[in-house]
Image (cartoon, helix red, strand yellow):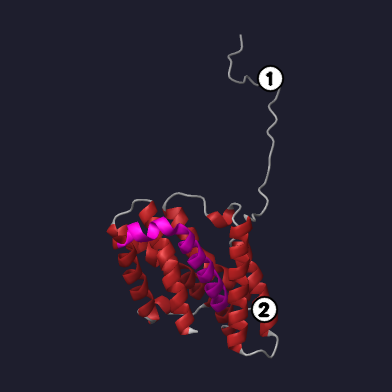
Amino acid sequence: MYIFDLLGTCVFAITGAVRGVRHKLDFLGVVVFACTVGVGGGVFRDVLLGATPVAAYEHESYLIVCIVTGVLVFFLAPQIVGRWHLVAIGDAIGLGIFTALGAAKGLMYGAGPIGIVLSGVFSAVVGGVLRDVMVRVVPAVLTSDFYATASLIGGLLYVLLSSTTLPFAVQITVTAITVTTIRLLAMRFKIHLPVARYWVEIPDDMDVGKKKR
């Protein structure tokens, strides 16, 4: 579980650092983005579960992985940023890993079914939400991107699997692969959630673009 968590942290740190480079942040900004996306979701999840000190503080390896990843991405930006499709694939893998491990930690700390699902979702998406807010962009998970939905489905799947006699490793693996597959299919076929539509009726007595005489 620890090894998978480090892998997911590294993958998410890469996506965060790349986003920092694309927004033309300086060296510190890129590293901060790597750390924010890499451990932000896990910190938020642990605080809600009362798992303190949070994993990122208890095991320095998480932050070290994020910092090293951010530094490497900063100096290798020309070779990495141009391969955004590979970064997106890595992000889908990280989404699957963090959803599975987050849900498992929710179960470990006695959360109910909804709490287990949300633990997985928060682990996977909160870091990205913080990143988007920091650059004043509406978080993708709140618009039409099929991202958090894949994580929700994965959390529900883990709740079902946790009630079976399947080994823990199988439950984690199946959940992670399912979420990653759903995300990749959504990317491949451009699957999005419907966006709210609205119509604004203008009263007859309103002046639109012209001054009343």
Residue position marked by numbered label 2 in the rendering: 159
Taking the magenta stretch, the answer to whether it contains residue 61 is no
Cβ atoms at labels 2 and 1 below 8 Å apart: no
Q: Is residue 99 above or below residue 172?
A: above
The x, y position of residue 6, in whole percent, is 43, 78
Q: How many marks?
A: 2
Which residue does the image show at 68% across and 33% down from the upper left? 200
Q: Which residues are magenta?
A: 76-102
Which residue does the image show at 65% across and 78% down from the upper left? 158
Q: Residues within 10 Å of mark 2 (few under 14, many from 20)?
A: many
Viewer-closest of 167 and 88: 88
Q: Earlier in the sequence, mark 2 or mark 1?
A: 2
Residue at the top extreme?
A: 213
Local secondary structure at mark 2:
helix
Q: Quadrant of residue 181?
A: bottom right
Q: CA distance from mark 2 to mark 1?
A: 56 Å
Q: Residues within 10 Å of mark 1 (few under 14, many from 20)?
A: few
> Residue 141: which numbered mark, if any?
none
User: What residue type is disc 2 on?
Assistant: Val
Which residue does the image show at 44% across and 73% down from the upper left? 9
The answer, for residue 54, to whether it is visible in the render is no
Viewer-closest of 62 and 54: 62
Residue position marked by numbered label 1 in the rendering: 205
Q: Quadrant of residue 149?
A: bottom right
Which SS does the magenta portion mostly show? Answer: helix
Which residue does the image show at 45% across and 58% down from the upper left? 84
